[in-house]
């Protein structure tokens, strides 16, 4: 086995974001390997991607089909995992081309922070989600590592172990079986999800996304325009706060599940019920770390990422 931290960049051949990331990685003097996805310009390319799409499993889990670009992203992720398995990398770092790594990220790579067992370590995270309060430290206390209490949205830049890769490929049978973050239930499959604080990287898509067409199909234009109106009038922080309050009874009372929007009980519990149940009780008992409370704090970022400590608009 090769004891070195490999950086695997997932991108597209003509991505306008890739040059920015490469420039940053070169400045940090970090080695990397780029895996380009398939754009689907012709039927042959589309068939190549769809061959690895388990439509039945996806619909059974998420109650919807995936768009081509979503599937293509999952396919690229699988290709990277298979490459790492073939090369027998003990640990590998996978990052999308829209991520901006910090100097602390470089220190993490240079110091070869390694993990054993079936683990995935996120370097950035968005709400909703919760962390357990116990932690370990690395890099002389500069970075704390927490274990996730719930599912987390931290798939864009993370480190995975060889044991995780083997288990993931076995469970999915090497196919795209669900959305990118994540297509399997980690708790049920004894996979440990960890999260760094401060965040070591941050997504900056340069106002460009290959997934935007797929996402637009999932939401009615009228709803999106209404939300934009409220954000413009009342501000992101206020509107996000109101939405989070309204979502608590909506999700813990299983309203979207009962209405048939989601049909997989385990998926619904993992993605929605658990998070909003803890959002209800955590202000009282203060037993977990709420990602919603920390992702806007400058203390959650290294110095060179502090400008990203802002409220964001999230689609749900």
Image (spheres, rainbow, N blue to C red):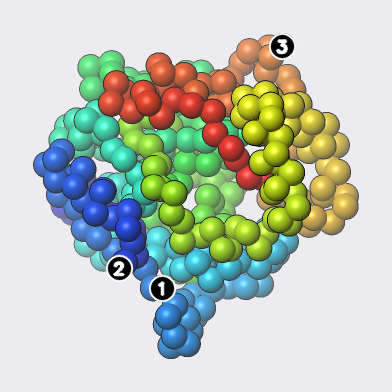
Residue 8's quadrant in the figure? bottom left
Q: Earlier along the polypeptide chain: callout 3 or callout 2?
A: 2
Q: Circle 2: is it few (<14), some (14-19), or many (20+) Cα within 10 Å?
A: few
Residue 51 placement, left or right of 79: right
Which numbered mark, 3 or 2, is in the foreground of this view? 2
Distance, label 2 to label 1, CA atoms, is: 8 Å
Residue at 15 percent across and 49 percent down: it is 31
Percent coordinates x, y for residue 6 in the rendering: 21, 50
User: Which residue is drawn at the image coordinates 66% and 72% (left, top)?
Assistant: 56
Residue under label 3: 284
Q: Residue 183 got which mark?
A: none
Left or right: 141 in relation to 154: left
- Residue 300 lies in quadrant: top left
Q: Secondary structure at mark 3?
A: helix
- For the residue pair 313 and 284, the one nearer the viewer reads as 313
- Whether the residues at callouts 1 and 3 have beta carbons within 8 Å, the answer is no
Is residue 301 placed above or below 95 in the rendered structure? Answer: above
Is 214 drawn above or below residue 50 in the view shown? Answer: above
Q: Residue at x 51, y 55 (%)?
A: 180
Q: Which residue is mark 1?
A: 39
Quadrant, the N terminus: bottom left
Question: Mark 2 near mark 1, Cβ–Cβ under 8 Å?
Answer: yes
User: Quarter of the image containing the C terminus?
Assistant: top right
Mark 2, residue position: 13
Query: In the picture, residue 239 is in which quadrant?
Result: top right
Task: Find the distance from the CA under tag 1 to the CA under tag 3.
Answer: 48 Å
* Residue 152 to residue 139: above or below: below
């Amino acid at each position: 086995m090769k004891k070195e931290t490999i950086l695997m960049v997932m991108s597209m051949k003509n991505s306008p974001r890739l040059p920015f990331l490469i420039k940053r990685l070169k400045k940090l003097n970090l080695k990397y390997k780029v895996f380009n996805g398939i754009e689907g310009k012709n039927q042959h390319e589309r068939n190549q991607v769809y061959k690895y799409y388990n439509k039945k499993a996806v619909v059974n889990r998420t109650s919807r089909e995936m768009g081509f670009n979503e599937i293509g992203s999952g396919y690229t992720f699988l290709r990277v995992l298979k490459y790492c398995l073939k090369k027998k990398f003990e640990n590998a770092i996978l990052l999308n081309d829209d991520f901006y790594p910090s100097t602390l990220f470089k220190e993490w790579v240079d110091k070869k922070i390694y993990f054993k067992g079936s683990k995935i370590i996120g370097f950035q995270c968005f709400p909703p989600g919760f962390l357990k309060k116990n932690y370990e430290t690395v890099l002389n206390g500069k970075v704390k590592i927490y274990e996730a209490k719930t599912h987390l949205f931290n798939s864009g830049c993370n480190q995975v172990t060889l044991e995780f890769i083997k288990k993931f490929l076995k469970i999915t049978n090497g196919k795209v079986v669900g959305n990118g973050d994540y297509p399997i239930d980690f708790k049920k499959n004894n996979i440990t999800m960890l999260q760094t604080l401060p965040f070591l990287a941050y997504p900056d898509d340069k106002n460009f996304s290959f997934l935007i067409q797929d996402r637009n199909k999932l939401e009615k234009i009228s709803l999106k325009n209404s939300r934009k109106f409220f954000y413009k009038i009342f501000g992101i922080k206020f509107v996000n706060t109101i939405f989070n309050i309204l979502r608590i009874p909506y999700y813990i009372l299983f309203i979207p599940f009962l209405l048939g929007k989601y049909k997989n009980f385990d998926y619904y519990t993992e993605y929605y019920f658990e998070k909003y149940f803890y959002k209800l009780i955590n202000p009282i008992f203060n037993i977990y770390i709420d990602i919603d409370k920390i992702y806007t704090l400058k203390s959650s970022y290294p110095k060179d990422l502090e400008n990203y400590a802002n409220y964001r608009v999230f689609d749900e």
